[in-house]
Amino acid sequence: MLLEVKRKNTTTDTNRVFAKSVRSIRRIFEETRKRLAVKLQNQRLLLIHFHTLRHWKATMLYHEIKDPLRVQEFLGHTTFQHTTKYIQLERTLFDESNDNFICKTAKTVEEAIPLIEISFEYVHEINGLHIYRKKA
């Protein structure tokens, strides 16, 4: 698919997919969004903007790594105060107090590898057993 995009590329720089100007990137994004909203009959798609994508990426990044300083660095924020909204969003979206989990245990590395491969996360060790969990 990428080779086809590169072949049909009309920009002067063959390594770019979009033109250099932000205005043209925005126009292409808005046209595509509008076309998809009509095709899928979902007008809520028109509410998605570039900042929406930025907020989503930052929230998901914090959910994955739980490190606000790395999120702050990723977003280029100079103060931590601007990063706190993503922490609050993550806590609202992923309220783990009501989540149900599937739990598994492993004694050896050979038992742990298949669990990690299917998205189980390490929680704790009790009496030599490693406990893993995954959202149900």
Image: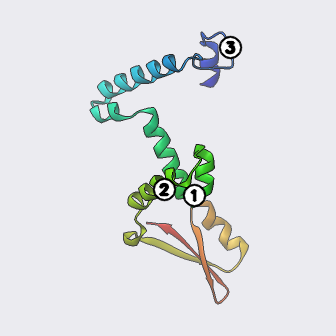
Using the rendered view, name the quadrant where residue 4 is placed.
top right
Task: Examine the rendering and report whether any part of residue 42 can be seen.
Answer: no
Other-residue count near label 1 (Cα within 10 Å), few / some / many at <14 / 14–19 / ≥20: some
x 59%, y 50%: residue? 72
In whole angstroms, how far apart are the C-alphas of marks 2 and 3? 39 Å
Alpha-carbon span between mark 1 and mark 2: 8 Å
Residue 11 horizontal/vertical position (percent)? 61, 11
Three-letter code, disc 3? Asp
Front one among 64 and 127: 64
Question: Marks 2 and 3: CB-CB under 8 Å?
Answer: no
Q: CA distance from mark 1 to mark 3?
A: 37 Å
Residue under label 2: 84
Question: How many numbered dots are placed on residues in this image?
Answer: 3
**Where is residue 41 shown, x and y percent of the image?**
27, 30
Return the disc, 2 or 3, that comes first in the chain's sequence: 3
Reading the image, the residue beneath label 1 is 68
Residue 78 appearing in the image = yes
Indicate the quadrant where residue 70 lies: bottom right
Q: Earlier in the sequence, mark 1 or mark 3?
A: 3
Quadrant location of residue 65? bottom right
